[in-house]
Amino acid sequence: MSEILVRFAHISDTHIEPEAGTRERRLATLERLKYMAGFPPAVLAEIIKHQEAALNGHYPYPTAVKASEALVAALNALETPLDFVLHTGDVVNHGDADQYVETARIFGGLNYPIRYAVGNHDKVENLYAGLLDKPAEKIAYDYSFAQNGVKFVCVDSATNGEGINWFVTQEQLAWLEAELTDGGDQPLVVAIHHPPFQIHIDWLDFFIVKNWPEIQTVLQKAGPRLRGVFSGHVHTPITCQRNGVLYSVVPEVFSHAPGYSVVTVTTEDIHIQRYTF
C-alpha cells in the first residue's frame, strides 16, 4: 500500500501589480500590441483578446491583487493540509521591485511556506531582493530542495532568454542532468515556468520554451523516479504524457477561469486534483 510523502499546491502566473493605475496600464499595453513585431497575427489576436477581457471586466476578479488574495483564502481553507505551495513563475506582471513588495504582503497571509520558479514577467534580481532576501543579481534561479523524502528541482527558463526566445542554457541542462541522476532513489519533481513540450495548439506552441526537445532528453534520463514536471505560462490547464514523463500545467490566477492544483506524491504514484476558486 502506498504512503503519502508530500502534498503541495501548484499555482502560477499571478501577475501581481499595484491596483492603482491598472486600467491605464492595460490600455497602454493594448496600444503597444498594435505595433508589436515578431508575433504571428493569430498569436497577437489571442493576446489582444485576453487583454480586452481583463480590461472590460470579464474576469471573476477585478484585479490581479484581488485574484491572488482570493487564491490565498482558498488555499488556507482546504480541508486537507499542504506541506507547501509551489509557484511556477510570472509572480508579478512587470518585474518591478514594488510589485514584489505587494506579493510578499499577499503571500504573507498563506498558512504554508511558498517556493518560487522564475517566469518571463519576473526580473530575477528583484525577485531575489523582494521575496528571497538574496543579493539582487541577474543570475538564473536554479535550485533544488528536499521535502519529506521527495526531491524538487526548479529550473529557470526565463532569465537567460531574450525577448520571446526563452530557453535553458547548456550549462543549466548539465546542472539539471546532474540533479536528476544523482544516484539517489527518492522521487523527483521538476518545476519550470515554460512548458517543455509541444501543445499542438499553434498560438500556444509559439510561447513554449524554445529548446524543449533538449530539455525532454535530459528529463527522460531520470527514469521512473521522475513523478512529474509542473509549469505555467500558457494560462490554461494542460496535462501531457510523453515518453513516460508526466507534464502538468495550471491556469493563470488572474484570468477568466482561475485555478490551481493540489498534488500528492506517494511512495508509488502521483495524484493531481484541479480546483477553481
Image (cartoon, rainbow, N blue to C red):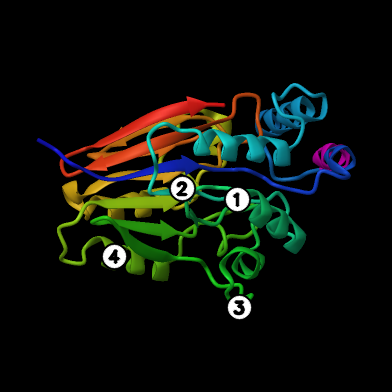
In-front residue for pair 22/31: 22
Residue type beneath disc 4? Glu
Residue type beneath disc 3? Pro
Q: Nearer the viewer, mark 3 or mark 2?
A: 2
Residue labelled with disc 4: 179
Image x and y of residue 179, in percent: 29, 65
Task: Give the structural element (helix, strand or loop) at label 4.
Answer: helix
Write down the region rendered in magenta: 27-35
Q: If you read the primary sequence from the N terminus, does the residue marked by circle 1 or circle 2 appear first? A: 2
Q: Are marks 1 and 3 in contact (CB under 8 Å)?
A: no
Q: Are marks 4 and 1 in contact (CB under 8 Å)?
A: no
User: Can you say whether 225 is above or below 54 in the image?
Assistant: below
Quick one: quadrant of the C terminus? top right
Q: If you read the primary sequence from the N terminus, does the residue marked by circle 4 or circle 2 appear first? A: 2
* Mark 1 residue crowding within 10 angstroms, few (<14) / some (14–19) / many (20+): some
Tell me if 97 is positioned left or right of 186 in this view.
right
Residue labelled with disc 1: 107
Residue labelled with disc 2: 85
